[in-house]
Image (cartoon, grey):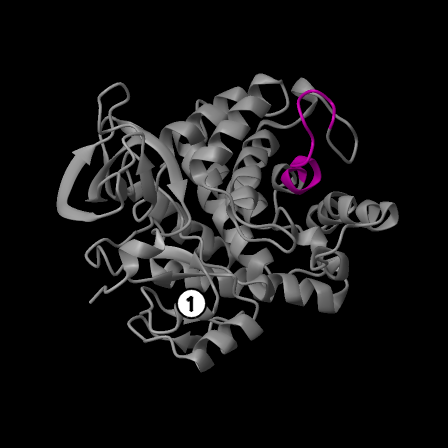
């Protein structure tokens, strides 16, 4: 399976996963062959990335901790919650939120794989809701592995805060969806989503004040460079520091208006640099680095030897040392598949780069 950008070149490819619209309705089923009409439909709906069956390694499929039913229900629930709040001017119908949190929590705690990744299949119409679900899942994963000592009740409250951390954006959706550079006034409105989200959540009796502070502080930075209050160090609640790491990671690896997704290994390195500079929490950043696959299954690699390979699995050696299948030699000529484990310092196993797609010559005459 490959996650690729949507475009005319996808005609004839087969979908690896079901594709839904922003309301959770099935658009195209897994296995569908993409026709020019289907590609136009995906483009019209704003889809920028999609999962297709890998023609050179059709047996390789990426999996994620969240069950499809869990992701679908979580996305529907957060969509209803935010839409209701927008329509009522701030009221939240909390029914169903706790059930969703419990389901996500079960999925993340039952997934004890050494390295995990959430699937990056998004469209801008539902980006805010998909992002909210992903941040919640990553936050619960980090919280369970952390030294915070949270019990089940605390994890539920943290999950609610993570799921609704961006709820203040319902008051500035015109700015959120804008693809052109923001004016100072527009950027000020966008920054206010933290205050608006806090004010909305703290008025809800069912929501813990600590969860409301996640919405308030998830853009604060330890060195005082964040917003809305420029808090630093211990002034920022630990839950907000944790969600900030999950938020930064998913935002950078996702497909947002005006920006293309970046590979996990690049984003993880950037977050480590941010932690080293004293802006992000180093402990939570380290936990993310230890649990998220730097090279997800399906990633297309160029080795230092010049060979082309595809990631087939993660290994116990760590999230940055996957198993991969070499498909072509340094001369870009196909070779008999050869499975190897990444091992820095060992010739033929060192990763040089992640490619957005196979070189064109490898896809020629593909059955």
- The C terminus appears in which quarter of the rendering? bottom left
Residue 222 in the magenta stretch? The answer is: yes
Number of dots carrying numbers: 1
Q: Residue at x 28, y 72 (%)?
A: 31
Instruction: For residue 281, say whether it is visible.
Output: no
Residue closer to the observer: 353 or 200? 353
Q: Is residue 148 above or below residue 154?
A: above
Q: Choose between 87 and 118: the one closer to the eye.
A: 118
Q: What percent of the width, then of the height, locates residue 365?
A: 23, 65
Q: Residue at x 51, y 77 (%)?
A: 40
Residue extending farthest right:
185
SS majority, magenta: loop
Q: Quadrant of residue 308?
A: top left
The image shows residue 336 at horizontal and vertical percentages of 12, 47
> Which image quarter: residue 161?
top right
Compared across the picture, whether 171 is left or right of 143 comes to right
Q: Residue at x 42, y 49 (%)?
A: 356
Quarter of the picture holding the N terminus: bottom left
Q: Dot 1: few (<14), some (14–19), or many (≥20) neighbours within 10 Å? A: few
Q: Nearer the viewer, residue 78 or 275?
A: 275
> In terms of secondary structure, where does tag 1 sit?
helix
**Residue 176 placed where, x, y %?**
71, 56
Q: Is residue 347 above or below residue 59?
A: above
- Magenta span contains residue 6: no
Relative to 9, is 330 above or below? above
The residue indicated by pointer 1 is: 9
362 relative to 154, above or below: below
Which residues make up the magenta segment? Answer: 213-225
Q: Is residue 180 left or right of residue 69?
A: right
Examine the rendering and report whether any part of residue 161 can be seen. Answer: yes
């Amino acid at each position: 399976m490959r996650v690729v950008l949507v475009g005319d070149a996808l005609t004839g490819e087969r979908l690896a996963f079901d594709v839904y619209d922003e309301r959770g309705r099935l658009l195209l089923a897994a296995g569908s062959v993409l026709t020019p009409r289907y590609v136009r439909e995906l483009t019209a709906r704003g889809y920028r990335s999609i999962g297709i069956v890998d023609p050179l390694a059709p047996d390789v499929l990426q999996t994620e901790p969240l069950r499809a039913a869990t992701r679908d229900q979580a996305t529907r629930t957060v969509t209803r919650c935010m839409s209701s709040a927008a329509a009522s001017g701030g009221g939240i119908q909390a029914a169903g939120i706790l059930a969703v949190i419990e389901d996500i929590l079960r999925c993340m705690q039952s997934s004890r794989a050494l390295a995990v990744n959430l699937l990056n299949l998004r469209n801008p119409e539902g980006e805010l809701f998909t992002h909210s679900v992903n941040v919640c899942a990553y936050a619960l994963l980090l919280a369970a592995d952390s030294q915070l000592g949270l019990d089940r009740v605390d994890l539920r409250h943290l999950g609610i805060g993570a799921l609704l951390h961006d709820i203040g954006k319902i008051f500035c959706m015109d700015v959120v969806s804008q693809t052109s550079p923001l004016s100072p006034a527009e950027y000020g409105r966008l920054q206010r989503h933290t205050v608006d989200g806090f004010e909305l959540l703290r008025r809800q009796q069912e929501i813990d004040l600590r969860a409301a502070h996640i919405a308030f502080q998830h853009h604060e930075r330890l060195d005082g460079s964040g917003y809305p209050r420029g808090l630093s160090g211990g002034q920022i609640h630990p839950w907000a520091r944790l969600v900030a790491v999950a938020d930064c990671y998913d935002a950078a690896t996702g497909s947002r208006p005006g920006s293309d997704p970046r590979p996990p290994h690049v984003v993880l390195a950037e977050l480590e640099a941010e932690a080293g500079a004293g802006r992000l929490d180093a402990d939570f950043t380290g936990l993310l680095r230890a649990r998220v696959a730097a090279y997800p299954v399906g990633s297309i690699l160029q080795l230092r030897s010049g060979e082309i390979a595809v990631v087939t699995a993660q290994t116990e050696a760590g999230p940055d040392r996957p198993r991969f299948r070499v498909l072509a030699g340094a001369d870009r000529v196909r070779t008999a598949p050869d499975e190897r484990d990444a091992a820095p310092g060992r010739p033929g196993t060192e990763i040089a780069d992640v490619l957005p797609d196979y070189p064109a010559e490898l896809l020629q005459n593909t059955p």
